[in-house]
Amino acid sequence: MSSRSGRFGIAAAALLAAPVLVGALYAAAGALGLVGPGASGRPSLARAVRVLTEPTVVQGTLWILWVAGASTLLSGTVAGGIAVVLRGRGKLEGLGRGLAVLPLPVPHLVAAVGGLLVLGQSGLLARVGFHAGLIDGPAEMPALVYDPLGVGLILALTWKEVPFLTLVAVSVLGTRGDALERTARGLGAGAGDVFRRVTWPILWRGMLPAAVAVFTFVAGSYEAAVILAPSDPLPLPVLTWERFVDAGLARRADAYVLALLGLGIAAVAVAAHEIVRARLPGLDGGSQA
Amino acid sequence: MGFLIRLPEVARLGGCAAGLLAMALAGCGSDSESGLDASTLAGLPWDSVVERARGSEVVWRLWRGDPAINSYVDEWVAPRLAERYDIRLRAVDGQGAELVNALVVEREAGARGGADLLWINGQTFHNLRREDLLQGPWAHALPSAAFVDSASTIVMRDFEQDLEGYESPWGRVQFALIYDTLRTPTPPRTVEELGRWIDEHPGRFTHDQSFTGMTFLKTLMYARAGGVERFEGGFDEDAYRVGRDSVFSWIEAHRDDFWREGNVYPSGVADLHRLFANGEVDFSMSNNENEAVTKARQGVLPESARPLVLREGTIANAHYVGIPFNAPNPAGAMVVADFLLSPEAQLEKRRPEVWGDGTVLDLDRLPDRWRARFDAIEDGPRAVPRDTLARYAVPEVAPEYHERLQEDWRRHVRDGG
């Protein structure tokens, strides 16, 4: 990269980051009690300590991390599987890939409402179960929405994220996989060895940045969580909004602390990805061969 | 020193950016374009206010979650304002605490105001007044203010706060439970009966986490802790604690028989309506006694849905419009507020097939032809009779009760569940 193009890249990245950085700066000032309603003007960590040690906040954070992790893992696995199975150039594979990415333009909000209509205790599944004589009423339908494990939310988010990760996985295999797999087969490797030693490493390493993006998105996503998540524990993004619009003006500064916590989770995920990328050989594509 | 930025400047910069991000403001500036504020305009002849408003745009920030209300505002109010005053009314979404947050950020950023008129009441009015984010007094200067039911404490006291001309009454509602006559032909009529009904029908009752649910809990508080009189006259810590404990003991006594054993609560009343309409629970609730009828008409609730007023009394309150401190067009906002208060607009809003929102006008002060038209409104057999509503109406109390009850319910019931 030339120094000129490097400077251009840094400027473009700074432009993208500026609103986040300024917002984070303002949130930090609010969290420290320097700005906002009820601000004392003297910096104090008392609010941050109180908020971050609240059981509600700890549980809500762990819960959304579980949902984000499970959704990412599940959607990554499904997308990887689809990419491996449907990577051929035949019409049927093309049709399959097209169908798999069909939910891509569906907004997350719509996916969540769809999840509610299908998985709710009076939803489509429950109605089918009722007509099939499997249940006698809504209460007998297993709770898949507002449930403590977040099954409905995880399924809705997985359905929504699979197309994006499928596109990435197909692209990764298409651009990096074919030649290496042919070489491996030419050197006498069996199908199992080719998958284990070539296809799988290319796939997961190539999908890792997209998976990190999905994880951070889900961890900070409000619209699906507010529709499908339980009220206890309240997921971090929903809790953040609840504090932000609290009737008590002074409690609204809690939201600044929680927003910074959400930002911190995203930053840690991205940093972890960078560390993994730097330490594992061959992550930048092709050199592992 | 060029790289050193003082903290207030950082805050101002941050506030501006946050405002830009959160509200898509047009930009950061320091001065409003209003010229005269609402309190000054209130001292001018009304014709002069109307002339200043003519040809302008009024941005009204209000809750946009109900198609019936949206239709009334967009398809009935807006065209008449355009026709009579050449005012372009632009209704944008925003409610409650969001309004306060937006104005606080705008003030910190020195930003141009994003709205001319706000739909407010209760805690929002309390916070806006406390933060000095409203213009006023001005509401007394509206010609239609002469028709307002000034003898009603429900209209003239917003959660026990004097209006002081900083907000103009717009509508009046009363809390009601909603039940289905086919599923529950003999519904409970008192808090005690409701508790027994819940125990006899496990999993068929809940309330939501939002304003409506908290109003239900306040109804319980009045009923179980000595009536509304005990809580009137400003916030009292001792009275609150007694009231709160009585509410929580009622909840604990019946919680295992709540929907999902009381471990989950719908986030808002729209979710509760959905659970009710889909047969997951047998009761919903609303802050508007006519909502059972209007929502049934819209197909959201079953045709057999009916409102139910508990005999211990249910909370009645009013809602208002206010003008934010940085409104670019206070003259336009005042003309819109006056039109909303006019007998014509109040009558249209009152019709059950339109919105069913109660009027804040004293019908005895209206010219005969308008009073006759109000009297001619047919609520239909599904609505609670007006004399029944009046008999069981109890007022709101200081906003701190709502605020504290919500905070404690979240901490001890929801999050501690």
Image (cartoon, grey):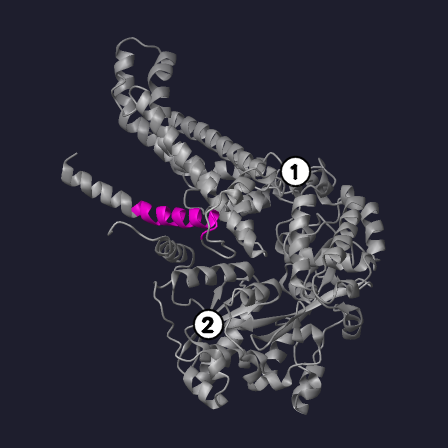
Determine the image quadrant of residue B384. Answer: bottom right
Indicate whether A27 appears above or below B105. Answer: above
Quadrant occupied by the C terminus of chain B? top right
Residue B189 at what x, y percent from top left? 83, 60
Determine the image quadrant of residue A58. Answer: top right
Please state which of the two labelled residues, at mark 1 or mark 2, is closer to the viewer.
Answer: 2
Q: Residue at x 67, y 81 (%)?
A: B150
Indicate whether A173 appears above or below B370. Answer: above
Which amino acid, mark 2?
Asp
Q: Residues within 10 Å of mark 1 (few under 14, many from 20)?
A: some
Q: From where the camera sits, is residue A96 visible? A: no
Q: Decide whether residue A25 is among the magenta residues.
A: yes
Q: Main secondary structure of the magenta part?
A: helix
Q: Residue at x 36, y 35 (%)?
A: A167
| Nearer to me, B309 or B127 | B127
Which residue corresponds to mark 1?
Answer: A143
Q: Residue at x 25, y 15 (%)?
A: A183
| Nearer to me, B180 or B160 | B160
Indicate whether B103 appears above or below A81. Answer: below
Which amino acid, mark 1?
Ala
Left or right: A22 with respect to B337?
left
State which region is magenta.
A16-34
Left or right: A89 with respect to B175?
left
Which chain's residue wears label 2? B
Q: What whole-number distance in Å separates the C-alpha atoms at marks 1 and 2?
A: 45 Å
Q: Residues within 10 Å of mark 2 (few under 14, many from 20)?
A: many
Local SS, label 2: loop
Residue B235 at what x, y percent from top left? 70, 61
Which residue corresponds to mark 2?
Answer: B116
Q: Decide whether residue B238 is among the magenta residues.
A: no
Q: Are marks 1 and 2 in contact (CB under 8 Å)?
A: no
